[in-house]
Amino acid sequence: MLITDIVERLAADDFLFVESRLSVRILSDIMATPVGDDPVFLDSWNRLEQDQYMADGGRYRKRRHATYAIDGAGQRARLMPYQPHYQTLDYNPLNGGVARYFAPILDDLHQSITLAALLEFGNRVFSQITGNPQWHIELHQFRIEARDGRMGKPTPEGVHRDGVDFVIVVMVKRVNIDSGATTIYNLDHQLVGEFTLRDSFDMVLVNDRKLYHGVTAITQLDADEEAFRDVLVITFKLKNIV
């Protein structure tokens, strides 16, 4: 499957699951070098910080956050000065309505060839679909933990939209967990897709204007071992063109 095939399928269905072998091949082609076995990228999830903005009092989510921008055709994503993450209560009734100052993503991840490939992949796909080459991009590193008999909630706000144009969710690692299924709903709240991101670099692309998405809670398999789900969420929002 080429990027043109992904563009066609995403434009037709508004979401697309891409399994890991294919996504790694596409990312490697974009960078003209092997992508996937990247310890700088993968190990950065071991240094996330506790999410301090959980209105449900949950202590099961760790994260880091950063903002990028793409200013025009042929340009690469550039890191922006740190800014908080904000969603209205319409999009996030649990944690929205406040500016959330998450711990910033660390420099080594910004220098990762894998991250550069993912950003360029999204840029190419979404720019072809919309004809717009200018993007406001947010990166969210998440670790959702299940421990002490308690579930971890990847989407504690429930099935939702993010208030952007497109979303990419990239599986990084699953350890000692059950469930964590991704669910996709149309604007009439009818289920149109369900699957589980299991392997590193399994990913899903979602048109956030046309679909809702969510992830079912995770549970611990072996009570004596740590249990978590690591993902990277990348959101693309069209920049206003003057």
Image (cartoon, grey):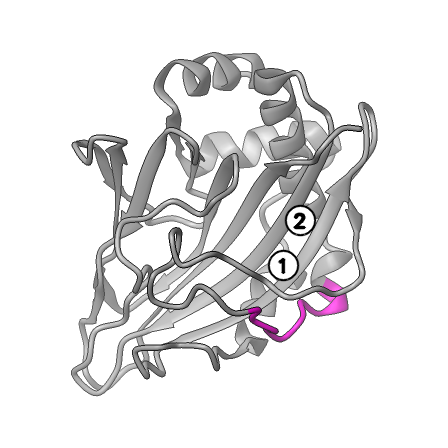
Please tell me which of labels 2 and 1 falls first in the chain: 1
Mark 1: amino acid: Phe
Number of dots carrying numbers: 2
- Mark carried by residue 55: none
Q: Point out the stretch of residues depicted in magenta.
A: 99-108
According to the image, label 2 marks what residue? Answer: 115
Q: Which residue occupies the foreground of this view, 35 or 172?
A: 172
Quadrant position of residue 125? top right
Query: Would residue 231 be counted in the magenta stretch?
Result: no
According to the image, label 1 marks what residue? Answer: 41
Quadrant position of residue 103? bottom right
The residue positioned 38% from the left and 48% from the top of the image is: 199
Principal secondary structure, stretch drawn in magenta = loop
Residue 171, position in %: x, y? 43, 51
The residue positioned 62% from the left and 51% from the top of the image is: 138
Query: Would residue 101 be counted in the magenta stretch?
Result: yes
- Judged from the image, the secondary structure of the residue bearing numbered disc 2 is helix
Residue 84, position in %: x, y? 64, 66
Which image quarter is the C terminus in? top right
Q: Is residue 88 left or right of residue 124?
A: left
The residue positioned 47% from the left and 47% from the top of the image is: 170
- Judged from the image, the secondary structure of the residue bearing numbered disc 1 is helix
Disc 2 from disc 1: Cα separation: 7 Å
Residue 173, position in %: x, y? 42, 59
The residue positioned 63% from the left and 59% from the top of the image is: 41
Nearer to us: label 2 or label 1 = 2
